[in-house]
Amino acid sequence: MVSIIVSFLAALLVSLIITPLVRKISLRRGLVDEPGGRRMQEEPVPRTGGVAILVAFIAPLAAVYIFQTAVGLRFYKDTMMATGIIAGSIIISLLGLADDVWGLGAKKKLLVQTLVAIGCYLIGFRIESVFLPFVGRLEMGVFGVIITIVWIVGIINAFNLIDGLDGLAAGVGFVALATNFVLGFSGDRLVLCLLVAALAGALIGFLRYNFNPATIFMGDSGSMLIGFVLATTSLMSNQKSSTMIAILVPIIAMGLPIMDTLFAIVRRFLERRPLFSPDRGHFHHRLIALGFTQKRAVLTLYVVSICLAAIALAIHFGRDWQKGLGLALMGIVVIVFTRIVWMIRRSHASAAAGSRHRDSMTEVIKSGLYEEMKRLEQVQEADGLKKEIDAFAKHMDIRTVRIEDADGKSVLFEHINPEYGIPARTSPVLIEYVIERAETGKIRLTFEWYAEYHNPSAQTDILLQMWVDVFEKKLHLLLQAGPNPPPSPFGLRRAGKP
């Protein structure tokens, strides 16, 4: 137990020390999230905090291999799984870091995550059977591989999706880690406890700088690391379960990110959008839309996570698991009911606001947005970027696309769709997005079209923001090109150039 406490404190101390260093280096190299779009901060914030979490997580574990402690001897007996978690954590975190810096795309990330999950299955992290109420023990057989891979990859991405507010992923992750620790300690899984304690200490130290107002974000390198460690350690904690009903325990303990991900998949499917496309429909976005401050929204979701963790532990330690299962289902029903009530409330508010809640432009953009975003991602030169703006305006039935400086005094680029016919009895609709990066300074991107209602709907705003996010990333990549880059887009200066 002493070794576990020391590992927690050592990870906490390392995290407190190294996080400011990572923040300073990231600011110097421009590895930051700029304000604007779906981002809620007002200043550029480094997005590489996952590096600090990874170092703080590994540091005390490395010491275990050096010093011959009682837990260290357990490590040597369970070397394969412990080393698998550490190696997998490094790979997953570096994958997230590469995405934070260069932007890898969903397919590449999913491929690497799947390969890591397959490796975990081969070394013993497996879901081979489950126990279903009123059915009994159900052997997975060959489907065990698929279910295990889906579990690991799913939890990794669930924590990636929930990382939308200051301190949210770190706090929810800590609650889930604490649950895994209790399960591991009750089953005498000291190696699991050491792994969980090290990451928990790293997260608490990181929260010192990540809680609102955050001075550093964990990025994909941190959120994916949390998800991976939780996915694998939850399988370790349940290996000795005779009934395998315990697999329900981590599902409930991590219920918030899991349900958020499932709702996102259903929502995007119903809206006929790509499953990996960003939106503002996550739980934390809903709370902010209701008027919650960031701190209040995060603390609310902390409470939800703690309640779900308590339900999970009640199932694990309860004598009658059916009662625990009923309690868990009750908790899920409450959350789902709360979400439905919120949707009804929003629907009523939207109806009161008039039919501009949903306009014809929403359907036009939705029908072709995915293809337009794919075409934009494939652009390799400045002229191609201008051509894609022209094509986007034509296909989305937008009259004018204008790029200008933040003050509106200098127009850098303007496209007016020559085929656009102004409908009768309509008014101009303007919607603006601000892009601010070290390479470009602050510029403003304006869309204009004509519609019956003067204000664009919330759906149109979100859909256009998705295209603008891809445009911003592509503009950034062109400005960061190699030693023989193509002409600078729109006359903007390059990084490091006057």
Image (cartoon, rainbow, N blue to C red):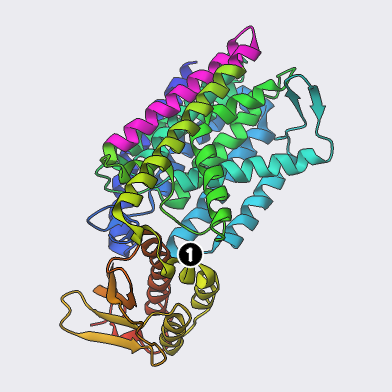
Circle 1 residue? 103
Viewer-nearest residue: 306 or 96: 306
Viewer-nearest residue: 103 or 147: 147
- Read off the magenta span: 296-324
Amino acid type, residue under disc 1 in the picture: Gly
The C terminus - image quarter? bottom left
Position of 240 with respect to 207 (left or right) is: right
Q: Estimate the x, y position of residue 368 in percent, counting from the top left.
A: 53, 73
Q: Estimate the x, y position of residue 346 in percent, counting from the top left.
A: 36, 45
Viewer-nearest residue: 405 or 82: 405
Identified at 80% across, 22% down, the residue is: 137
Position of 197 with respect to 14 (left or right) is: right
User: Residue reaching furthest top?
Assistant: 319
The residue carrying pointer 1 sits among few (fewer than 14), some (14 to 19) or many (20 or more) residues within 10 Å by Cα, namely some
User: Residue reaching furthest front?
Assistant: 425
Position of 361 with respect to 111 (left or right) is: left
Q: Quadrant of residue 461?
A: bottom left
State yes or no: residue 195 in magenta.
no
Identified at 70% across, 19% down, the residue is: 241
